[in-house]
Amino acid sequence: MATLTLARWAVALEPTSLPPSVLKAAQRSLYNYIGCAIGGSNHPTVTKALSALSLFFGPPTSTLLGHSQPTSKPDPQPTKTDAQHAALLNGIASHVHDYDDTHLATIIHPTGPVASALLAYAELHPTPISGLDLLTALTAGIEAACKLGLALWPTHYDVGWHITSTTGSVGAAVAVAKLMNLSVQATAHAIGLAATQATGLREMFGSDTKSFHPGRAAQNGLLAAVLAQRGFTSSTAALEARRGWGNVLVCGSTPRLEEFVGQLGVVWETERNAFKPFPCGIVCHPGMDGGIQLHFELAQKALKVEDVEKVELRVHPLVLELTGKKTPRDGLEAKFSVFHGVAVALLYGKAGPAEYADAVVQDPSVISLRNRISATADESLGADESYEVVVLKDGRRLENHVRHAVGSLEVPMSDEQLRGKFVDQVGPVLGVEGARRASEVAWGVGEVEDVRGWVGRLS
Amino acid sequence: MATLTLARWAVALEPTSLPPSVLKAAQRSLYNYIGCAIGGSNHPTVTKALSALSLFFGPPTSTLLGHSQPTSKPDPQPTKTDAQHAALLNGIASHVHDYDDTHLATIIHPTGPVASALLAYAELHPTPISGLDLLTALTAGIEAACKLGLALWPTHYDVGWHITSTTGSVGAAVAVAKLMNLSVQATAHAIGLAATQATGLREMFGSDTKSFHPGRAAQNGLLAAVLAQRGFTSSTAALEARRGWGNVLVCGSTPRLEEFVGQLGVVWETERNAFKPFPCGIVCHPGMDGGIQLHFELAQKALKVEDVEKVELRVHPLVLELTGKKTPRDGLEAKFSVFHGVAVALLYGKAGPAEYADAVVQDPSVISLRNRISATADESLGADESYEVVVLKDGRRLENHVRHAVGSLEVPMSDEQLRGKFVDQVGPVLGVEGARRASEVAWGVGEVEDVRGWVGRLS
């Protein structure tokens, strides 16, 4: 009954059924998504996809986030395209810097697929959609994706599925179906149509196709909802049937669909969605959080990085296993180097996309500091914990202990930090002024009377 | 190495590398596909998809098979659309009557995904494409899909994947990449991009989504090739990697990729592709083949169906397990009734789509004959074998033994039978004259100098 249970819950969901904390979490998720999608919009992965697919573009109904300012180049890029391609390209952009949100219990990045489908569809909806309705639909989609992810976790990910896109297709379908006001039956068929498009193999990690996954999931879900709206049928037992989504995608293990779908509206996954403060592997974050704190302590003491003899880091073993790259050669490799992350944190007191530019990774002062950092694995530490000691040339020691890294559920990014992140990633695309303006527009979604005009004002 | 081996083989394939019998099989596969796609083009499943998706349609470069004659209705349907939507809609149409081809060793219907992508892309290719080049690309795609199917058979299908679309995505990508003349590297990336879009759950059988699968597979493959052409990367070990396509999609069993990909160009799967003479479950076919033979024997003896007391059928047990429906209520149920199939075969001497119309299924004379047919399971018979006895009211008995049903590899449909099938399915869409004209155009693909204009002349 998981398929129909999910459909019934989504259809019945009202803006007033959302606890204020959930609504707030949804607003923060959407805001963070918009920053990521604009920030990633000029990445080569997006540019390649856009130029490859422009020959298929349909009526320009839907905004390409970050593209709203036509360039003065002889061949200006489009600022809008059809909803299907907008969903794909915004979805790719939102994930391409590995800087998006994370539902920590499943490592799903839920907002990318769901919001990409939702915003693209919203702009061609026949009647006004309030910001509150948009957030409600977004919540429905995020809850759907994360509950399905929990039901299949961890086998599904272990065998090789990119859980963000496999669950994201269904999440996107549920969200768009919600906005369309589909019946329970039609919503169930949309879920089935999305489920049968099981996109995303982990083997693609490290290539352009990784960020293609959430984009394609957005398209899958949008397509599913649009077809179901016209009476296209699939299966109303798509998730739980013997040869349905759950069983097929956990490969002989038993999915816990009833258990988690049964908790819809009781435990809210949207509240358990975290935001990355740094555009790199999440296990680097405690050391970097500590590094930033130590940067300001050094500054307070009028000390410079040149005064530092060495840095000793103690971290969870997973940190070195996943991000132990000692001498990264470029920005992409630096995302998997805790040494680079800690070095820029100490040196600059921040670590945004700019600190992962190739030129920074290859900067002699960064390299010099990186080479003075050593790291030890300590099984007694949590994955979001670190001990860090700065040993000065005069023998003094500055110590720092991060119990839970910023961006964890225990120490969530504050609104101010989220806003700083937004402007920091969007600035290089829209300029600082444009970034601040976009930030204000994006932040205020809850008060918008009709999001159909609002989406185009985001960039 | 399966991914690169497949890519290398496809890139090296030349029209002259194809044995004449393979080229002929490819031509028959394409011809049969075109008849199925036109024949299915006005099915409600296609109509629903077309009306749902028209809001996304891009530049009308590519033919919607069967739609080329604008209707006089106030809201005429388009005759062309962008290549992505043409691939989807033609792919749905080709499978919607369950009347397409079958690679019997894997029960893949290979031509639907591959040809739908290929024809849609061909019309926007920048330079001329000969019919021979088209057939070579088609063969590359069919071989790719079937070899991958063999490598995962039967576990992949057993656990719940619709093998036609999971392998068809890759087949379509290989075929389009071949037509684009992509490098080995780019072809490998196209294979990976197609592989990561693993569409098709068997739970959807019996709904509109079943025929959506080959259509979506065509889109997946086309998208993969178009992106790879622009340098979009995936993984050149996409098929064989630990968390790649093969291992993930056989759920812990071991795919035999090297074995079957290694046989590319040695054993040709295109030659092992069979065509359905009747639009119904393939296990009904031996009894229906016998029924048609007995129809003509009755006619020769100037006997009528009214003279028949009863019909006794002896068949493989699977026939009754899969198609044992004694009193089908409509055309869709009749596809799974060996009794209906044998009744119309005896009564009309043929069993095309017309004999599966609801009105025929509900016709009293058909019902009366159906009720006089009994069937016994006999394990000693092959699945494509049947014994049939017509007992006349005067006590005489006409006996028939079908050793291998028409449409099996042992008794393939003749060119004449294939042409009869084409006109029979296309007639209701284009009229008999239009069907004959389309048949001539489709049959002659091998001599076409530039298929870009030819596709539009098909309907």
Image: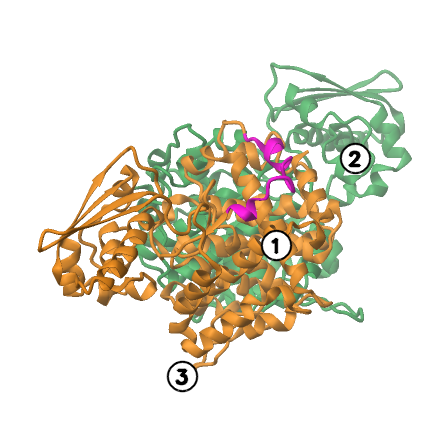
Chain colours: A orange, B green
Structural distance between the alpha carbons of marks 2 and 1: 62 Å
- Chain containing the residue with disc 3: A
Secondary-structure class at tag 3: loop
Q: Earlier in the sequence, mark 3 or mark 1?
A: 1
Residue A319 placement, left or right of B69? left
- Nearest to viewer (mark 3 / mark 2): 3
In which chain is the residue bearing label 1? A
Image location of residue A292, percent across then percent down = 29, 57
Viewed as shown, does residue A146 lie left or right of B18? right
How packed mark 2 is, by other alpha carbons closer than 10 Å (few <14, some 14-19, many 20 or more), is: many
Question: Quick one: B234 or A92, which is closer to the camera?
Answer: A92
Q: Position of residue B139 (x, y in %)?
A: 44, 49
Please provide percent x and percent y for residue A125.
69, 65
Q: Is A246 covered by the magenta stretch?
A: no
Three-letter residue code for mark 2: Val
| Quadrant into which the N terminus of chain A falls | top right
Pinpoint the chain carrying mark 2: B
Which residue corresponds to mark 2?
B344
Magenta segment, which residues? A255-272
Q: Amino acid at mark 3?
A: Lys
Please state if B271 lies on the left or on the right of B228 as rendered. Answer: right
Q: Which mark is residue A73?
A: 3
Q: Position of residue B307 (x, y in %)?
A: 88, 25
Give whichever of A440, A220 is nearer the camera. A440
User: Which marked residue is nearer to the observer: mark 3 or mark 1?
Assistant: 1
> From the viewer's perspective, is residue A134 above or below residue B197?
below
Whether residue A162 is visible: yes
Looking at the picture, do discs 3 and 1 lie on one chain?
yes
What residue sits 79% from the left and 31% below the top? B343
The numbered disc on residue A23 is 1
Whether residue A259 is in magenta: the answer is yes
Task: Specify the label residue A382 is tagged with.
Answer: none
